[in-house]
Image (cartoon, helix red, strand yellow):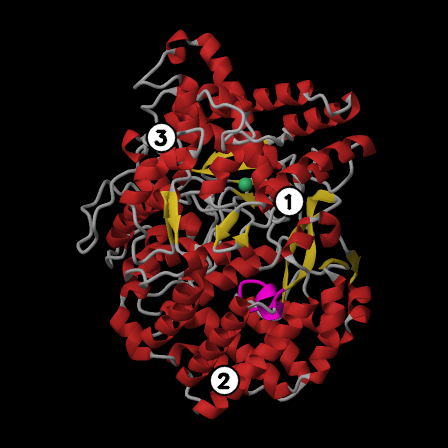
Amino acid sequence: MLLKRVLPTFLLAATAAFAQGGAPAHKDTKPAPTPAVTAKKAAAPSGAEMVARPKSFDLDAMDKSVDPCEDFYEYACGNWRKKNPIPSDQARWGRFNELAEYNRQTLHQILEKDSANNPKRTPVQQKIGDMYQSCMDESAVNKKGKAPLKPELDRIAAISNKNQLIDAIAYLQNVGVPVLFGFSSQPDLHNASVEIAGVAQGGLGLPDRDYYLNPDAKSKETREKYLDHLATTFGLLGDSPEASKKEAQAVMDIETKLAEAAYERVKMRDPKNRDHKMKVSELAALAPNFQFERYFTARNAPAFTEVNVVPPDFFQKVNPVLASVSLSDWKTYLRWHATRAAAPLLSEDFVNANFNFYGKFLSGQKELQPRWKRCVQTTDGLLGEALGQPYVDETFGKEGKERMLEMVKALEQALGQDIQTLDWMTPETKTKAEEKLKAISNKIGYPDKWRDYGTVKIMRGNLLANAQAARAFEVKRNLNKIGKPLDKSEWGMSPPTVNAYYSAAENDINFPAGILQPPFFDRNADDAVNFGGIGVVIGHELTHGFDDQGSKFDAAGNFTDWWTPADRQEFDKRTGCVADEYSSFVAVDDLHLNGRLTLGENTADNGGIHIALMALRKQMEKDAKLAQEKEGFTPEQRFFVGFAQVWCENRTPESARLLVKTDPHSPGQYRVIGTVQNNADFAKAFNCKAGQKMVSANACHVW
Ligand SMILES: [Zn+2]
């Protein structure tokens, strides 16, 4: 994936689209005022099972036979985990998924209603309704087979020299097919108020470079299965078994070279490895075979003279590959990626082949999701801020936003207080940290102005063309930002998403409406539970401003060193402790977590829980009732159980393995155990003694 908005840090990785081979999640805005799309609770569409809304602080989820001081995760989640095996159409199943399924149901009702060909529909209803209709009309999609892809394949077949190859790469990227490398707008690392051009490593079909390069048995098996999948796909395009096998190997050879040239994920976490702005002429000289002048013209981007190159090594190393690999192999590579991007939207032979590899083999998902679920997901992924409008009208009240703002304020105060009392930081750096904290803005629920999809043409009965139109719109919208001021009002997630993020360039925290529900946020629950749920999430996002990546950006979102060297050393010592702690945890078999890859998230989890409890205590001083026991638990105990229950989950061994490689977040089990082990307040709340498993002898503290 290319660098999107200087790596926003999400609360949870979005893997569903990958497992389903679905459309890349990208959302989009309509100018206010919005048409009144008041879809009053339509009847549940037939064929769908109704999902109940998840509960917060769920006594039935707990396994009280477990000692909370020995395994707090099993204590808080044990029964939930036993009672909630992974559904066959999922690769993991947790509280996030429960809520996402609940939200999907609402979206399903909206889309079923709007997909009826009613002349009174608003433009927004027409777009989301017809996108969904074109996806749901499975018999039409199956009847067409690979025909909708034919114009793309013909275009690739017609390439007869390397100039045309560059033009074809530019064309495919313009319609949203990720090949060879990425090109997009991005906030300038040193002047975040402006968007500049950026090119980045990419072009792989496997989820990480390591799959191509690692010598272990599992990586080898993955490569074999990938070769099979490539050959299957070429077979579906009509090639003979012998030709398909050769073509598969050609793709593997090219992608292996791209993988060799690419930086590792951990290396990419350090902003200095993503900081290589140069003149376009310098880039062109660095990697002449890319023909960048020709390429940028073909992309139809606004004019620019400077470009950030992530990393220059990649382009330098791939440069000779462009010359040495035959034109025919390059065409095979493009053919594969054009097909891969379209596969989930083609007939069922393509859908199934794509699922068998990406869903079943890589993620351990047993069955493909029912079509309606994939079609809801596709519509959300392609027209997120259109579908988000009726969703928000139906689900999100003003009251929720006000209470959230109060909680955010309480958490910001707690973090400010925490910074002031740190014994390892000098007053000089504290002042800067305080400045940064004060500058953090927050976005709650949904965008102030919706993305305008007016120019995207969506037709009934033409799924791939619709998806290409929406993807092309998104690509163009992104490139058009080059040279313009950073638009801080923009969102990187659609409103129904069950997730949250911090953006270093914008220096803001973002909470879509989709997550502001139980088990995270429950209007009927007491503050102890809500501070353990959404309170910790808010604390987590705020802390991202001060994790291994965020701490290198200042209040204005610029990559700059605002730390004294001594403070930075102390910080590194403390984050090093966190990295070592999490590297000791085992995800599956003998596969350990990568404490360096997950460092930012683990730091945010630890900081988040610490400051959320501070904020709750402050609240308890004001509200005597809150300090009382309830259902046999003290408020602190309810806080910790509420926190842990957000992370109840089961995952397939395959997805556990995949996520260790690709996900900067730790599994739910360790998000709970890793944090409470470090937390003295936890030990106090449950009377845990030194020597017990949930009391670390070497507790790590950053924030
Ligand atoms: Zn996070």
**Which residue is situated farthest in the front direction here?**
691
Q: Residues within 10 Å of mark 2 (few under 14, many from 20)?
A: few
Residue 335 placement (x, y as % from top left)? 52, 79
| Residue 210 is inside the magenta segment | yes
Q: Quadrant of the C terminus?
A: top right
- Nearer-N-terminus badge (2/1): 2
The residue tagged with tag 1: helix, strand or loop?
loop
**158 lies left or right of 465:** right
Q: Main secondary structure of the magenta part?
A: loop
Q: Residue at x 32, y 33 (%)?
A: 62
Residue 700 placement (x, y as % from top left)? 62, 32
Say whether residue 28 is visible: no
Residue on which the image places disc 3: 397
Q: Residue at x 63, y 52 (%)?
A: 481
Residue on which the image places disc 2: 154
The residue tagged with tag 2: helix, strand or loop?
helix
- Which residue is at the front of the view, 628 or 44? 628
Report, in whole angstroms, how far the alpha carbon at label 1 lies from the one at label 3.
29 Å
Q: Quadrant of ligand 1?
A: top right
Report, in whole angstroms, how far the alpha carbon at label 2 lies from the one at label 3.
50 Å
Amino acid bearing label 1: Leu
| Residue 660 is inside the magenta segment | no
Amino acid bearing label 2: Asp
